[in-house]
Amino acid sequence: MRLRSISIILFLSVSLIKAQAQDTLKAKAKSISTELNVNLFQGSLSFNNALQQIKVRYFRTDDVAYRFGFIGSYNQYNNQTPTQNTQKTGTFGVNLGLEKHFKGTRRLSPYIGAELSFVAKWSKQVFDYGSSQRIIKGGWIEQTSGSYTQLGYFRYGANFVSGFDYYPAKNFFFGYEFTFQLYRKSYSDVDDGNGTIINGTLKGSSEFFIGPNLINGIRLGYIF
């Protein structure tokens, strides 16, 4: 009788441990997640990366996820003095990538990944003098200094990432991500509106970057 009781207790204990191990809180196949970036020291809330992209992940399996980032923005400023000065700029970009998640624990999901990134920005400025207009394409001119800002560009490259998701509750996680970037940015020529094309408005018409980039803040996300 005692042996039977001990056997039952052992069986129930093993079954409970096994059930708890299987009852993971982490994302599973076909899960879709999104996230924000929170900076506790600055009290700011933003999208998850430096480009302010909306980020979505789709888990093809329990340990493989597709990454998709999107940005689409448009800004217009109308200044009345000393003349009617309208400034416009827009940005469009996408990131496409893949993540590989490792075993971790019931709540912790470390991962590595890579993604391709494409971003384009355009700028335009219109001075309206009433009887005529001056239209600047490719940037904005500072009237006091004569220098150009908000330059248009096309940027492409790759990001290699490493990070983790931690699930304090089901369908909710926080984490951090480290990025190693490689990209090239080519700046647009600036048409100054007077028939002159200004090439290489910076120290050159393009720039190349390779190196690490820390996304400042904590990632907060949830699963749909």
Image: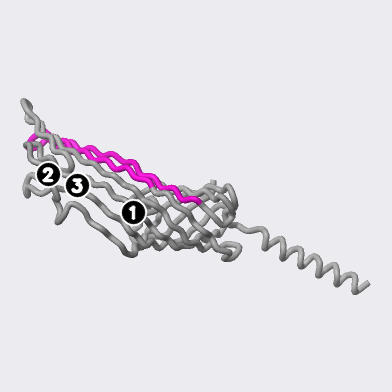
Residue 43: give x, y in percent of width and height. 35, 57
- Circle 1 residue: 157
Residue 109: give x, y in percent of width and height. 54, 61
**Magenta segment includes 74:** yes
Q: What is the three-letter code of the residue carrying label 1? A: Gly
Q: Select label 1 or label 3 by which is in front.
A: 1
Residue 143: give x, y in percent of width and height. 8, 44
- Circle 2 residue: 141
Q: Crowdedness of circle 3 by 10 Å Cα count: few (<14), some, many (20+)?
A: many
The residue at 76%/67% (across/down) is 14
Q: Crowdedness of circle 1 by 10 Å Cα count: few (<14), some, many (20+)?
A: some
Q: Answer with the quarter of the image where residue 62 lies.
A: bottom right
- Circle 3 residue: 151
The residue furthest right is: 1
Q: Looking at this view, is 146 or 100 the one in front?
A: 100
Looking at marks 2 and 3 on the same chain, the residue that comes earlier in the sequence is marked by 2
In magenta, the rendered stretch is: 66-94
Q: Are marks 2 and 3 in contact (CB under 8 Å)?
A: no
CA gap, disc 1 and disc 3: 19 Å
Q: What is the three-letter code of the residue carrying label 3? A: Leu
Q: Is residue 56 left or right of residue 80?
A: right
Q: What is the three-letter code of the residue carrying label 2? A: Ile
Looking at marks 2 and 1 on the same chain, the residue that comes earlier in the sequence is marked by 2
Q: Is residue 206 left or right of residue 41?
A: left
Looking at marks 1 and 3 on the same chain, the residue that comes earlier in the sequence is marked by 3
CA gap, disc 2 and disc 3: 10 Å
The residue furthest top is: 131
Looking at the rendered structure, the secondary structure element under dot 1 is: strand
